[in-house]
Amino acid sequence: MLNPKIGLFFLAFLPQFVSTNAQSPFLETIYFGCLFVAVGGVVNLVYALTAVKSSQYAGKATRKWLQKWIPGGVLVGLGIRLVVLEE
């Protein structure tokens, strides 16, 4: 609600899916909005549960190593990719 870009996105995106023959376009738009929120909630819940389970399987030393090296490795990899693509 505090991010106007989200509202503008939905005002531009959702009406494309509303049927031109709909009896109540407003209610159909609300339905699609709720459907989007529900699907997004399920996807985020799956991500969260996967993160919890994977952190339970990884030991403390493994977790510490991952937290230390993976973000740096990703940044170095993106830097190398940028250099390769620029040539």
Image (cartoon, rainbow, N blue to C red):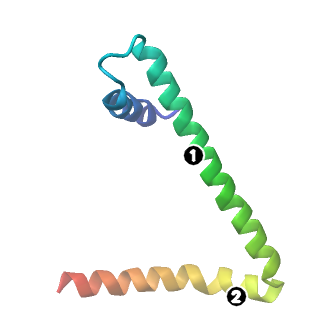
Check disc 2 and give the amino acid type. Trp
Horizontal and vertical percent position of residue 43: 60, 53
**76 over 30 or under it: above or below:** below
- Give the image quarter of residue 29: top left
Horizontal and vertical percent position of residue 31: 52, 26
Q: Write the residue at 70% across / 66% down.
A: 50
The residue carrying pointer 1 sits among few (fewer than 14), some (14 to 19) or many (20 or more) residues within 10 Å by Cα, namely few
SS class of the residue under badge 2? helix
The residue carrying pointer 2 sits among few (fewer than 14), some (14 to 19) or many (20 or more) residues within 10 Å by Cα, namely few
Residue on which the image places disc 2: 65
Q: CA distance from mark 2 to mark 1?
A: 31 Å
Q: Nearer the viewer, mark 2 or mark 1?
A: 1
Q: Are marks 2 and 1 in contact (CB under 8 Å)?
A: no
**5 over 78 or under it: above or below:** above
**1 over 74 or under it: above or below:** above
SS class of the residue under badge 1? helix
Looking at the image, which is closer to me, 9 or 61?
9
